[in-house]
Image (cartoon, coloured by chain):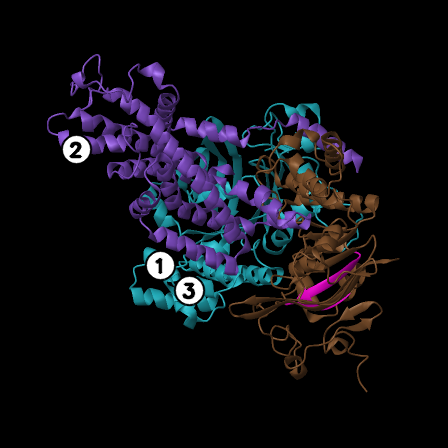
Chain colours: A purple, B brown, C cyan
Amino acid sequence: MTEIFKTNEKISELITIKKKSQTREIITRFLRNRTALLGLIIIVLMVFCALFPQTITHYDPIEQSLREQFIAPNSTHLFGTDEFGRDVFTRVVYGCRTSLLIGVTAVAISGVIGIIFGCISGFYGRIVDNLMMRGIDILMAVPIILLGMTIVAAFGQSVLNLTIAIAMASIAPYARLVRVSVLSVKEKEYVEAARATGANDLRIIMKYILPNCMAPIIVHATMNIASAILSATALSFLGLGVPAPTPEWGSMTSAARAYVRDYWWLVTFPGMAIMAAVFSFNLFGDGLRDALDPKLKN
Amino acid sequence: MTVLLEVNNLKKYFKTPRGMLYAVDGVSFKIERGSTLGVVGESGCGKSTLGRTAIHLHEKTSGKILFEGEDISDVNKKQLKALRRDMQMIFQDPFSSLNPRMSVGQIIAEPLLIYRMCRNKKEMAAKVEELMEIVGLSKRYANSYPHELDGGRRQRIGVARALSLKPKFIVCDEPVSALDVSIQAQILNLMQDLQEEFDLTYMFITHNMAVVKHISDEIMVMYLGNMVEMASSEGMFHHRLHPYTKALLAAVPIPEVMERGPRRLLKGEITSVINPKQECRFNTRCPYSTEICTHENPPLLEAMPKHFVACHRVKEINFPTLTGG
Amino acid sequence: MAEILLEIKDLMVQYKVGNEVTKAVNGITLTLEKGESMGLVGETGAGKTTTARAIMQLVPSPPGKIVGGQILYDGEDLIKKNASKMRKVRGHKISMIFQDPMTALNPVYTVGEQIAEVIQLHQNVSKREALEKAKKMMELVGIEGARHDEFPHNFSGGMKQRIVIAIALACNPSLLIADEPTTALDVTIQAQVMDLIERLKEEFNTSLLLITHDLGIVAEVCSKVAIIYAGKIVEYGTLDHIYNNTKHPYTIGLFGSIPNFNENVHRLKPIPGLMPDPSNLPEGCSFAERCKDVMDICRRGDIPVYEVEPNHLVKCLKYCKQREK
């Protein structure tokens, strides 16, 4: 027995193994995609704006200066000023923080709840699955605007309530996505093998099933941030979202409706910011999906 | 010789939309410690289900299972977990039986972790290394992932994982069918060596006749949920009493240049056994089928010393001169 | 002197992904006569499927590409044919059947339609006539013509493979390429399908290129054998040459790896190691690392082909005293 193993050893030393960890492969594939890279760059810029707005602009986003109302874009005020004399550029930059905060938090909350739902539903099946999925169906039937209005009407207008409303509307897709992944992975032989070695249900879900479902979840989460930001701006536009005077792109655009004709910069720049944010997350998500394509995993 | 595993009238039925599938329908056998029972048959015969049910991976429908003399037919979760240490499984597909998100070392260490067999990380790593060496895997692969390795190495990981708890009994479900011929031979030799070194008992499930003859001490032939013949390896190949066994062995292409007579083919297709009637399940394809075969399922009888066959006409077909009078 | 139907000369096929070049086929030369059947035997990654695809000009490109050699069919070089000319050849002059019958048929068309489709593509007949011919083909392969309007999912694996054969032979091609046609089938069904292929081959005088890893099937059906390893043919000759006078160490190793039906061997003699990575082939003989008779000169330069007896060619320096070919 030992001689064959010794020969195998020698041979393996001569044959070089190409040790590329899966993550490195994915990163390389992602970086090759130029549009995805563009998305990533914009996201990094936004994160920077969110974390260190003071380094980009020295103005205060909230302090009013009525003598400087409605100044058109120039060298001192890149995006001009609004009806209260506040620098629009500064408000757009600070708006990054609000939007990203809401977007990421809402996705995190809905993600965790949705994954738990999806796991239990997919893993245990039958009655549990049926009941849970019907609950999800009901949740999906409620339009987010309506949900937002209800929550704000009941609990008041605040960033937290806005985030909760958006999170609740986003749970359903995660639950469904996870459930489908769990259903397919559950039947794989390595799950059976884990059972044969005595693993309990929790271990099987956490170590064997979930890690193999993560690809579609990650992609969805990224796109979800985009739609969460969009929802936040929509609700704020309607007056249900972030209360004034916190800078938020949606409420800025809403307030600028009255001045669209005369002071175009009040609507344009916040609008472009919304577009850039959504666009970048979508590009990033698309790139991620391509990079994680299981076809290339072989 | 002590009997390690004894199975009595084991049945496993599955509920399907079209009716009840009688996957395993009353199978009984004994496996002696240190020996290998080969289970052969084609698609739908129930051999994989049999293997899994015997070690409680499927919940049995009825029947008795005795392990080392103890009745383990109905066990609770705690007893089952303890049992798992003694009864392990090696799977067919080295590509899908390993978690793609875990490294080789993690996969082999899993059973040790679940049963808390090691006191610290160092002990665990040492044990994993030891297991890898036993199965002929270079320890450089400990941090590799399954998709980076070839079929033969992946199957060695499966073997190492099965060995980690020092089991007494291993069900091998087509462990070499997905491998190239030259790698098959390496793994078969490995399994034989391990059996000698660790006094292992195997249930070796396969559809490959030559492989089963090579590795088994006793062979059991299954067809649509029933055991149709059981004998020693030599006896099975020498005598082949059941018509299905005859057809099965005749169908195997032999890699030799020789005069071949006209092929004696089995007519018909392999069906599935949903809501079966009272009949011999092989009768629709059997060249010797008569009236009794269509309304009575033949019992398993000892046609020759230690050679069991389930066929109404076994004596007439095989020993025509003895019947009569 | 028998007519030569297919002549492959020094075929080279490569796959290029990014910067990595995989040399799938590295100079394959073989000849097939009219009505002859040849077995192309090799393991996974040897290049047999790529060779078959190359003949049909179906190598996916990118990333694959035929980078050298000729494929002469009836005197014409298939590599030089443009797409529309090649389409006239496929299904009509050369047909191919693939390994997995489960996915070879389109699930949304009836089987009759699928057989009729190939007839309509190459013969100038009406739809009704084509369907009539299709029904006749079905009867020929052992399936009731009345079932022509059923969908593939109504048929078992063996029957699906028969339908695939019917499609392949519908236009009476002179060459049938069968890529592991029975690997996915049960043993008794495999015997039925191989029998069918043989009968039809006789009836239509079709040449057969059988690609497989199973030396048993080759012995049953083929008269000539080519052993392929790492994209090159290492041994080539008649059935008798290869089975009774095996010369190349790889072929000897292959025979040593398979459990013998008739003799009792305690341990198999597997070939140690693995086939080399086709994107990183070593210099000299690709088998050198695994060969127990390896010599220093084996690792340098191209290995010539020697004729060890009339029409028996071996690519191995052990036989350098023989005539070079």
Could you tell me if the residues under marks 2 and 3 are in contact, i.e. CB atoms within 8 Å?
A: no
Q: State whether residue C206 appears in this view.
A: no
Pick the front one: C236 or B108: B108
Residue range of the region highlighted in magenta in the rendering: B217-230
Which of discs 1 and 2 lies nearer the camera? The answer is: 2
Judged by its main secondary structure, the magenta piece is strand
Disc 3 crowd, CA 10 A, few/some/many (<14, 14-19, 20+): some
Q: Position of residue C261 (x, y in %)?
A: 73, 55
Q: Read off the chain for label 1.
A: C
Identify the residue at image location x=14%, y=29%: A259
Quadrant (top left/top right/bottom left/bottom right) for the C terminus of chain C: top right
Q: How many marks?
A: 3
Depth check, front residue: B275 or A85: A85
- Assess whether mark 2 and mark 1 are in contact (beta carbons under 8 angstroms): no
- SS at mark 2? helix
What amino acid is found at the position of numbered circle 3 in the picture?
Phe
Give the image location of residue C213, x and y in percent.
60, 47
Give the vertical position of A90 relative to C123 (above or below): above
**Res. C232 image quadrant:** top right
Disc on res. C73 = none
Marks 1/2: CA distance? 63 Å
Relative to residue C212, is residue C128 depicted above or below? below
- Tell me the residue at 68%/35% (across/down): C273
Considering only order in the chain, which callout, 1 or 3, is on the residue closer to the N terminus?
Answer: 1
Q: Which mark is residue A257?
A: 2
Q: At which x and y percent is residue A173?
A: 40, 47
- CA gap, disc 3 and disc 1: 15 Å
Q: Which residue is mark 1?
A: C117
| Residue A230 part of the magenta segment | no
* Location of mark 3 (residue): C151
